[in-house]
Image: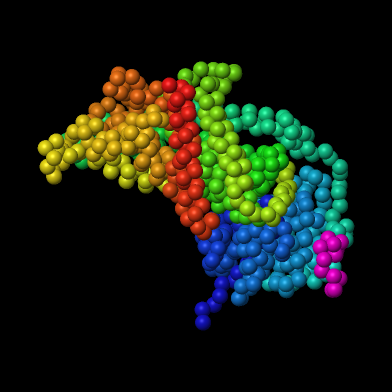
Amino acid sequence: MENKPFKIVLVGNPNCGKSSLFNNLTKLKQKITNVPGTTIENKVGTVSKGKQKIELIDTPGTYSFNPKSLDEKEAIRVFFEDPPPNTILYIADASNLKRNLFYFSQLSQHGIPMILALNMTDIADFKGFEIDVERLEKELGIRVFKINARTGEGVNTLKEALFEDQFVPHYQFGSENDHTHESHYDSIGKLLNKTTKIKTKRELITGKIDAFATHPILGYLIFLLVLLFIFQSVFTLASYPMDWIENGFGMLSEYLANVLPDGWVKKLIIHGLVAGIAGVVVFVPQIAILFFFMSLLEDTGYMARVSFIMDKMLRGLGLSGKSVVPLLSGAACAIPAIMSTRNIENWKDRLITIMVTPLMSCSARLPVYTLLISMAIPNTPVIGFISLQALVMLSMYVLGTVAALIAAVIFKWFIKYNIPSYFIMELPVYHSPRWGNIWVNCWQKSRSFVTEAGKIILIISVVLWFLASYGPKTDQSLSIQESPSLEQSYAGHFGKAIEPSIAPIGFDWKIGIALITSFAAREVFVGTMSTIYSVGDEEDFDQLREKMKKDRNQNGEPVYSLAVILSLMVFYAFAMQCMSTLAVVYKETRSWKWPTIQFVYMTVLAYFGSWVVFSIFS
């Protein structure tokens, strides 16, 4: 019989630093496993010491052995496996031991060997807490370690202990016949009175900052200013690397034009592949800057304050306070944002959050917004260094947020679920960002953006190039015509077929082609336009904006007027143009009913919104 691997389960309350410790111990030797019959995904890692290996399982954070959400149920399920874990590695926030030790007290009664790791010791020291580790070990009868998972302090010592024999704690939490919450908390209080003390009473810097950051009025204003600064940075800081990328691809295109022999392969490579891919790669600096600031705000603890100040407003609109994190995460990508709704216990709150999160302007919309704003909106300073382009960009994000909140109210009327929901959240103290983690996160997210979008764009660019480079013969024969005008190509015929349905919102047949292809992913719009406007034109693709500006309709009027551009931006703000998001919604709801409703209502909203905007500005 094959030997079972030594298995250690990592448990603790939410936001106690489990993920940081897990990554530190496993050195990213991890894999994701789906739990049968659920939508939950477990992280399983390997801890190595020479030839010895330990399987480390990271469970979702929970406050007690009485699960409510899907994540919490999975955190408990691992203890009922056959065989059960060999050891429990319990990580606790050293600055809030009374709350963190409650779950520990419940687990200690299951007879599984335990190790206690006191994390965030720097915060505990800052608060003035002094913990007598030796006394705590003596009282509990187990090994206790002080660590800082963020910096790695004490982690190596803890790792060594994982490969040693451990002992079951003998500390009695409550009397033998009394296992109520009050009994446990009473025992925890007595334990902490013996093992901890407060050295000083200092007013935390966090409290001073929160007087402004969580103020019922100033809090919203500060958050708005933070967003405005981010969007201004997206335009200003990214302009130089974007120019470098455009020039680099321009030189590559020129080089290929000189070395490749004439023929359809040369046209495919230059006007199909290079033009399409470059239309997305050029926006990587803006994507990276957006992810950088989002990671920075989350890592310093400011995002938790945003959740706090928006809680009352969201609860009044039919959402849970826990919906804040998925909604804000939707500004990066709707897919992980929707998956993060698993910690919302109330099904109605969770379902509404899933249904409205894609209306938040994600990073895939950023290339579309940037291209269209740069065509129609001058880069004129408005307030100090804040430009008109940044204000328009901010307005698109505000538009998506307002639409999501209104949609939440409407869904609140139609979705019936009478179990009340509650929002409990502990605000972490502010701390300096972990720059290494932030840079790694930016790199991974930016790389994912390019690779995931690139797969789709590569295929669509080749198909578009063919459809735009060839067309049916005018004599109606079965043969095809090579190098026709764009309007006479297959793509042109296809665009003309759908043009009557999109003409009321200001779109022509070329925009129609891009709308269809970008249903695979929103960012494909830019690659599609690059491919369409590069075919049959020896100019470099980096002149896309100029080509689009110069384009005229049959009446000699600009195709991309202000009304058309604004209409197009509104359409992309509302439309569900992401097949991956629909797939995730199906996975999370286990029904095609909800992704179908989501697709229909967002498409109708996009069309109606575009029609209103186009009618007003025409």
Query: Does the magenta portion include 362?
Result: no
Instruction: Provide residue 603's location: percent of width, then percent of height.
Output: 45, 41
Say if 143 sits above or below 483 in the image.
Answer: below
Q: Is residue 165 visible?
A: yes
Position of 393 compared to 207: left or right?
Answer: left
Q: Is residue 432 left or right of residue 294?
A: right
Q: Position of residue 441 (x, y in %)?
A: 54, 44
Q: How is the image coloured?
A: rainbow
The count of marks equals 0
| Residue 185 among those drawn in magenta | yes
Give me the residue at 53% from left, 31% from top. Answer: 396
Question: Quick check: can you spot residue 372?
Answer: no
Height in image: 283 above or below 437? above
The answer to which of 540 and 592 lies nearer the viewer is: 592
Residue drawn at x 64%, y 43% is 324
Front in this rendered view, residue 343 or 151? 343
Name the residue nearer the viewer: 119 or 380.
Answer: 380
Question: What residue range appears in magenta?
Answer: 175-188
Identity of the residue drawn at 72% across and 64% down:
65
Quadrant into which the C terminus falls: top left
| Image quarter of residue 506 | top left
Q: Position of residue 92 (x, y in %)?
A: 73, 56
Counting from the top left corner in percent of width and height, residue 525 is at 38, 37
Q: Quadrant of residue 490?
A: top left
| Residue 147 in which image quadrant | bottom right
**Residue drawn at point x = 44 percent, y = 26 percent:** 614
